[in-house]
Image (cartoon, helix red, strand yellow):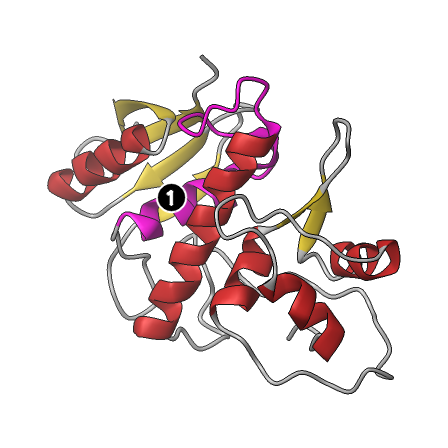
Amino acid sequence: MAKPTTAAQRRVIAAADPVTGRLTGTEAQLTALVRLRLAFRHPRPPHAYFLTPAGHRVREEPEQAVPETAPVEPAPGVFAARTGTEDGTHAVTDGPARQREVRAAWLGLVEMRRMTNPDADRDRPCAWERGHLVQAAAIALEAAGRTPATPDREGYRVTATPQPEAVAVREPTPEGVRACAEALERAGWQVSEHSERAAGAGRYVLVSPRRG
């Protein structure tokens, strides 16, 4: 689990611009949020700070803050994309809370696109997505209402491929494959449908981030 934030850090997060996620605060506060992976520093001047998808989630779903004297330590992200390939050792929790997490993560990605794509294009994957293809595709699918596979149910599965900028998405039915392809196209990805090599093994979607 992620380390809890302090009351001061939560005030900074709560005061972020509701549209852009831009943060204001002291350099120490903003740097601490970056260490917690709740904020990132824009690479171009004026090098402003903005909420990450995890930071958006914290703002939408506040948790109890810890005292101001609590140490600030780096922590893993508070949101985990579901690729449908998880081994089942961790319980999968669905419901409204998960839906809010996914929505916040998707909105955070859209905002990162606006802030980091050279032309502020929200409809094209950003550098973070191109560097985390499997996770980014999974977030887009779950945000579109697709269901990830678990050991107890069927659903989409996102896996890496030998191609450096492509992932494979599989569903157990042709209708599911097409629905995944349509969802990813709407999310700004380039898709192509292919047949599995094994005879009768069905079809899958090869997905890559659209660049232009």
Expressed as whole percent of the image width and height from the top left, the position of residue 22 reads 62, 47
User: Where are the magenta residues, as a range?
Assistant: 116-144
Expressed as whole percent of the image width and height from the top left, the position of residue 117 reads 57, 24
Q: Is residue 67 left or right of residue 152?
A: right
Label 1 neighbour load within 10 Å: few <14, some 14-19, many 20+: many
Q: Is residue 208 left or right of residue 95?
A: right
Q: Is residue 117 above or below residue 39?
A: above
Q: In this view, does 191 lie to the left or right of 200?
A: right
Residue at the spot x=14%, y=38% of the render?
A: 174
Quickly name the residue at label 1: 140
Q: Assign the C terminus to one quadrant of the image.
A: top left
Residue at the spot x=77%, y=31% of the render?
A: 46
Residue at the spot x=70%, y=56% of the render?
A: 37
Res. 42 image quadrant:
top right
Residue at the spot x=39%, y=28% of the render?
A: 207
- The residue closer to the viewer here, 140 or 193, is 140
